[in-house]
Every structure is written in C-alpha cells, then in structure tokens.
Amino acid sequence: QAADTPSTTTLSGEWELSRHVKVFLLLLQLLVTSGTLGYSLDNPLTYVRKDFVSGKPVKCDACQPGYYLRAHCTATQKSQCAPCPPGSFTAIWNYIDKCLRCGVCGLNEVVKKPCTASNDSQCACKDGYFFHPRYNMCTRHSECPSGQGVLTEGTAEKDTVCHTCPDGTFSKSSSARQNCTQHRSCSDVGLKTVLRGSSWHDSVCGSCEENNGRNSALKQITKCVLFLGLVVQIEFSCLAKPKDVEKKFVFF
C-alpha cells in the first residue's frame, strides 16, 4: 500500500545534487592544481599562474563551459582551449586538462536530457516507476489492493496514493491505476439484490424467475439422484440373492 504522504524528493533533484558535486570537485581541482595558480570565484574568466620563462605571474584566460584547457598561457601566448569530446562535459569556466565524463542513467531510468558539452545528462524514472529516496533508485509504483482505489496515480517523482473505497463503491483487484467502481444497481435493470456489494466485490443481482428455475432444476436433480440410488440398491440386492440361495442349499 502506498503511503498517504509520498515523498517529494525527485530524481531530477538527485541528479542536480550529483551535478553540483561534480562542479564542486571541479572547483576543488582548480584551486589545488598548483600553488602557482590563482582562481577567483568573483572573476572565474581568468586565473593567475607563474610564467616559467620570466618567473613573473601572468593572468590567463579560463576556458568557457564545454571546453577544457589544452595549454596554459604564457607571457607571450594566450590560453589554448579545446572543445570537450563526445561523452564528456564542463559546466563552468575552468582550466582543467580534461573534461568530466557524462553521467549514465541507472536501472529503470530513461534519459530526460542528453549530455552536452556544457551540461551533464539528466535522468528520470521510466513509466510505472518513481524515485524512492530510501533506496536511492527508481522503484515500481505501489498497487492499491482490493478494497482500495487509486486516489492519485504515481508519477516519476511520487508513489501511488491509495484510499479505502467509500460506501457504494468497490475494487476487486490490485491496481496502480484503477479507482473504485460504483456498485451495480439491481433495481435499475429490474432485478433483485441477491448479495449486497462491499468494498471488494460488486452487488450480485437475480430475478424471481431465475430463482424458481434454479429451484425446479434442483428438484429434478434431487429426483434423479434418489432414482439412481434406488437402482443401485436393487442391483445390489439382486447380486446378493444367489449367494444367499447357495448358502441355504449347502447347509440344507
């Protein structure tokens, strides 16, 4: 049974968190690459490094998202940037020597947005599944059992919400999509209610003619059974008589 208050955590949120982690690691890599390099979050378009020829600090241009640094700048030459190859990306201005690998969608996930040179791929749960924060994976939508109907169908972010079928309605099987169904009205079709409906089964209708016919058929069946019983008893008696005669003849 689905919870009454499903979680609002989304798969896209998890991927957003993963993307932020990658960006953080990228920034960390930029800050610790070398003591001779300086990176300012206030001005991410440039960084400072020591020129190995002159020994003086030089300000270099960083590479834009979708590119990586092929060669540092010098006192006489600008930074050389190259586009990220397929299957990799950089989401911020950077001076790393290679792009980050694109994320891969997991089990029961589909690609919501494909990876580009400047953005990581985004995934979502496939149809019939939702992201379960406890298991950190896409899980099949819960089915509402018999006696309960679907109040709200599950989405890629939320599980199914079930509710008990109110009076006058029923649900006879488990389902992740079916809501409660109205009981059949026997009087509307000129029939009598033989069995009143409940939350898990429909009303059972019948007519007086059907009942009389069933009673008549039951009487006929009873007569046949009694007749067959009588025949069997007669046959048994007939088979038993010769033995009795034989016994009497022997002892005579």
Image (tube, rainbow, N blue to C red):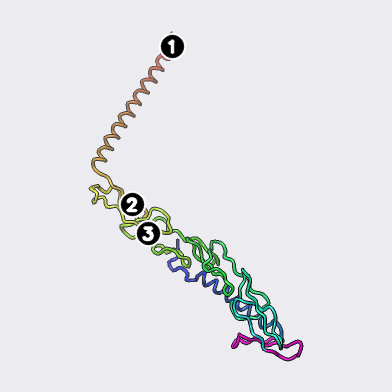
**Would you name the residue on which mark 1 appears?**
246
Q: Which residue is mark 2?
A: 202
- Whether 242 is drawn above or below 229: the answer is above
- Which image quadrant is residue 236 in? top left
Mark 2 or mark 1, which is nearer the start of the sequence? 2
Q: Is residue 175 above or below residue 134?
A: above
Magenta highlight on residue 42: yes
In the image, which disc is placed on residue 54? none
Q: Which residues are magenta?
A: 36-58
Image position, residue 227 (x, y; %) = 32, 26
User: Which image quadrant: the N terminus?
Assistant: bottom left
In the drawing, does residue 104 fall left or right of residue 74? left
Residue 47 image position (x, y, % from top left): 65, 86
At mark 2, the secondary structure is loop
Work out whether 228 lies above or below 25.
above
Q: Nearer the viewer, residue 1 or 128?
A: 128
In the drawing, does residue 191 fall left or right of residue 199? left
Q: Earlier in the sequence, mark 3 or mark 2?
A: 3
Q: Secondary structure beneath disc 1?
A: helix
Q: Amino acid at mark 1?
A: Glu
Disc 1 packing (10 Å; few <14; some 14–19; many ≥20): few
Residue type at the position of mark 2? Asp
Q: Which residue is at the far front?
A: 76
Relative vertical location of residue 172 with respect to residue 207 in this rendering, above or below: below
**Badge 3 or badge 1: first in the primary sequence:** 3
The residue carrying mark 3 is: 179
Judged left or right of residue 245, residue 193 is left
Measured Cα–Cα span from mark 3 to mark 1: 77 Å
Residue at image point 30% right, 29% down: 223
